[in-house]
Amino acid sequence: MGRVVQKYGGSSVADADSIKRVARRVVATREEGHEVVVVISAMGDTTDDLLDLATEVSPSPPPRELDMLLTAGERMSAALLAMAIHDLGSQARSFTGSQAGVITTGTHGNARITNITPGRITEALASGHIVIVAGFQGVSQDSKDITTIGRGGSDTTAVALAGALDADYCEIYTDVDGVFTADPRILPAARRIPEISYEEMLELAAAGSKILHLRCVEYARRENVAVHVRSSFSAKEGTWVKDLKELTVEQAIISGVAHDRDEAKVTVIGVPDRVGAAARIFEAIAVAEINIDMIVQNVSTVGTARTDISFTLPTGDGEKAIAALKVIADEVGFADTAYDDQIGKVSVVGVGMRSHPGVTAKFFGALAEADINIGMISTSEIRISIVVDQSDVERAVRAAHTAFGLDAEGEAVVYAGTGR
Ligand code: ASP
Ligand code: MG
């Protein structure tokens, strides 16, 4: 008998009927002879609604209390799903993250899972129960307080449990049929990717693809958990995320095109071109706990010996970055800063790049043909990313997708949800 972990996202359990539909699916899996552990997200937009409610009560709610509040969302759907399963004549038991043995660090709002002690889960499975675990939450090892592990964290809960329980695989149920060669919401010609390696999935997640949480893929790779991303609205095969060595389908040179509109660009203008200036700038940014992505430094102008340094960061950190830079302006001796949040990042990802020359030329050629100007460039061994004007993002995705022969005949189906 196999052991399966299934995770259902908020759009799959948005109302009572959806919860009943998920219950039927879970029971069907149990009846195929599997032990089933289900990780569940909060219903629909519950997490956002709870966040709004919290800020209505208090402009900056204490993080500990915010976690107490938000974890209630997943607890509701876990209990409701257990009830729906009972109604179908099967036995189910719901657990909070803490009861399920999800142990985390103490950073409220963004804790990391450090250990799983799944004793209660294995007991419940052994007595023939379907186990339902509230996703996105755990308990801090030190403070014993309830924590959350970051937005979209239920995916990570599911993969972590699959690893700890030595499950055969982890199914992530969502509102699209799997991982696509581009976001089907903006590109109907996107194709489902049948199989993809952990490395490529990591790059796609980091490049802005919202389908799987970055931390969840890191976890899956570390624990070597096979992840099947598929739709809860259809019975179709989705996308298997596995170790590169275990892939069976022949891999395309480019697996997918990802985009991200949530980045902004900061430019530090007139930086004296001398040793230590860049170090000081990025130290100030690091102290402000801002993660930066791309960096470009212009050649210094002969005569002035000054240069401009631009970097990208999450849009939400823009103000903080500018404030941190103001503090060191005189010390470093730069003239000014500029901020632009009307940018977007477009990336092509594929392990085939390692062995095929000319990928960059093809990508940039397609952009040139579409009359799109490239603002910044960065690469890894299996990724090329560019920054363009935000208004050019969709056209750039389309141009790259067509150039690398990824366009499909049929239209991709988006079943529900907002793509968050
Ligand atoms: N409900 C949480 C969120 O919206 C966690 C999750 O859905 O994975 O971020
Ligand atoms: Mg999600």
Image: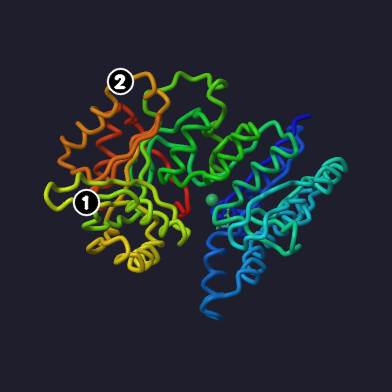
User: Please, which residue is most extreme toward the left here?
Assistant: 303
Q: Quadrant of the N terminus?
A: top right
* Tag 1 and tag 2, C-beta contact below 8 Å: no
In the rendered view, tell whether residue 293 sits above or below residue 349.
below
- Which sits in the foreground, 306 or 218? 306
Give amino acid for label 1. Answer: Thr
Q: Position of residue 179 (x, y in %)?
A: 47, 37
Mark 1 or mark 2: whose residue is earlier in sequence:
1
Residue position for label 1: 307
Cβ at disc 1 under 8 Å from ligand 1: no
Q: Is residue 403 left or right of residue 354?
A: left
- Which sits in the foreground, 314 or 234? 314
Mark 1 residue element:
strand
Residue at 45 percent across and 31 percent down: it is 193
Q: Position of residue 408 (x, y in %)?
A: 34, 30
Residue position for label 2: 357
User: Please, which residue is most extreme toward the bottom here?
Assistant: 57
Q: Residues within 10 Å of mark 1 (few under 14, many from 20)?
A: some
Mark 2 residue element:
loop
- Which sits in the foreground, 59 or 171? 59
Number of the front mark, 1 or 2 = 1
Please indicate, yes or no, whether residue 83 appears anywhere in the rendered image.
no
Q: Position of residue 122 (x, y in %)?
A: 82, 42
Give amino acid for label 2. Answer: Pro
Q: Residues within 10 Å of mark 2 (few under 14, many from 20)?
A: few
